[in-house]
Amino acid sequence: MHTTGERRVERRLSYNWPVWFAENFEGELSQGQMTDVSSRGAAFTCYADERCPHPGQHVTARFSIPRYGPDESFDVVDFIRSGHICRVEGVNSALRRIAMQFHEPLPFCPGEQPGL
């Protein structure tokens, strides 16, 4: 029997749009670049500096997701979600890839929309 390391139960939507995040939304927000999102979490890149989140840290993120219609049109839906950082990986010397799990899931599965 062949098994893989894949644990995802939901297809993710891959796209490159801005995401803003901070530990506390009353302070300065950092900007990253969304790489993929599911109803329960997201992955994004950010600069590898002192504002880069670390594993276990609680953050709040603000981002937009395209929501596709049956006629190949789409609207952009805005979200704010709090969650915790599951993983931080180095992309290169300047960038890190951040995996975040939401405390509250999104109301739809972005990667499982009709027309994708």
Image: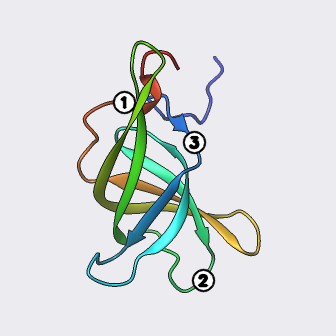
Query: Does residue 104 lie above or below 10 as drawn?
Result: below
Relative vertical location of residue 17 with respect to residue 94 in this rendering, above or below: above
**Residue 79 shown left or right of residue 87 in the figure:** left
How far apart are the two marked residues, 3 and 2, measured between alpha carbons? 23 Å
* Up/down of 115 relative to 3, above or below: above
Q: Is residue 49 left or right of residue 104?
A: right
Residue 23 x, y percent position in the rendering: 34, 76
Q: Which label is found at residue 90?
A: none
In the rendered image, residue 19, in percent from the top left (x then y), is placed at 46, 60
Q: Is residue 50 visible?
A: yes
Query: In the image as oriented, which residue stretches furthest toward the right?
Result: 92
The residue sitting at 43% across, 23% down in the picture is 112
Classify residue 47 by image quadrant.
bottom right
In the rendered image, which residue does mark 3 sit on?
Answer: 15
If you read the primary sequence from the N terminus, does the residue marked by circle 3 or circle 2 appear first? Answer: 3
User: What is the crowding at mark 3: few (fewer than 14 residues within 10 Å), some, or many (at least 20)?
Assistant: some
